[in-house]
Amino acid sequence: MKVLLTGASGMLGRTTAQALIERGDDVCVLQRRPSGLACREVLGDVADPTAVLRAAVGRDAVLHLAAKVDVVGRWPDYAHANIEGTRTLVEACRRLAVPRLVHVSSPSVAHAGRSLVGAGAEPADPGTARGHYARSKAVAEQLALAADTAALAVLVIRPHLVWGPGDTQLVGRLVARAGAGRLPLLGHGTALIDTTYVANAAAALMAAVDACGRAHGEALVVSNGEPRPVREVLARLCRAAAVPAPHLQVPVRLARLAGAAVDGIWAVTGCQETPPITRFLAEQLSTAHWFDQRRTRQVLGWTPQVDLDAGFARLAEWYAAGQPPVA
């Protein structure tokens, strides 16, 4: 299959692109900096129609991962990358008659701060989504699903808390804070959360590319399907990186109030440094969020091949080897 993948410079995008190449697909990647992958590459902004058309021409499917992922930054930057980028991809698919679009979203588009226990993929809601990232991704998901027609099949995948070797977004930040003694537990750390090992998330995205067409017009949450307490997840990640696990406990209410205050200060000052806490982060670390995977596995014909224990072991091996480049 001829696949265009956007966002190959990120951990999940790179892992997925490599897996597509290895199974024999004709892959083209689009991102702003070189990926080093052994495939055709177009450098450019995902919101630039010229670059997107050049990359998408002749493709059988588009797998859209490119996004601005952060907890700080101006709304226009998130809107440009996540909303305008998605709109540009949709228009290119329509213009070039690309029949399949797999849009990578996030469970945060439907998270209003309350616990999610065995939840399905509830509709994206920009009005209740927390923070610029989640809100912009909610709008982008709505745009993508609205484009689903007989001519363009659109399938949305929401990978949940993806991690693995080479991860700078989740593991890298948590380990850095833990190593500096700045990673507390909120409450008792007993809230159950689900996560996704990167190889499983990549396999699910490949399955989505294959399924898109017979399956379309819906969103599916992807995870390992192994809910664990927050305390355990953080401890296992820290153990893999050989840094102390968090032991300081901060009351949940205090953490949420601090997060709201920090959000306000960062918004007023325009600070671009990573904050110590945000309202969204406080909610994520203190509420349960795990998802019913039955619909996802039925539609995609996919099941995770790397369980959490094996994933933690692979992460520990990566750190023990001195963090070599991840292929």
Image (tube, rainbow, N blue to C red):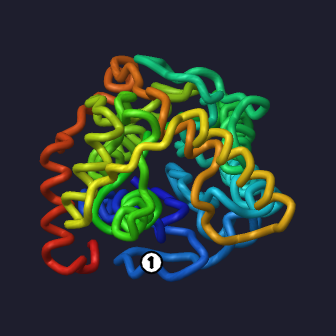
In the rendered view, would you say 47 is above or below 250? below
- 181 vs 46, left or right, is left
Q: Is residue 300 left or right of residue 280?
A: left
Residue type indicated by callout 1: Ser
Image quadrant for the C terminus?
A: bottom left
- Tell me if residue 147 can be seen: yes
Judge whether residue 159 can be spotted in this image.
no
Q: Camera-side residue: 208 or 233?
A: 233
Residue placed at 35% from the left, 77% from the top?
A: 38
| Residue 233 image point, x, y percent | 29, 44
Q: Residues within 10 Å of mark 1 (few under 14, many from 20)?
A: many
The residue at the far right in this view is 268
Q: Nearer the viewer, residue 249 or 100?
A: 249
Q: Is residue 17 left or right of residue 275?
A: left
Q: Residue at x 53, y 43 (%)?
A: 102
In this rendering, the answer to whether 258 lies above or below 48 is: above
Q: Is residue 133 left or right of residue 187?
A: right
- In which quadrant of the rendered view does residue 267 lie? bottom right
| In-front residue for pair 270/155 | 270
Residue 88 rendering spot, x and y as whole percentages: 74, 55
Q: Position of residue 145 (x, y in %)?
A: 66, 32
In the image, residue 156 sits, relative to residue 315, either above or below, namely above
What residue is shown with label 1? 35
Q: Where does residue 155 sit, x and y in percent of width and height? A: 54, 34
- Residue at (76% x, 61% y) in the render: 266
**Residue found at x 46% / y 40%:** 186
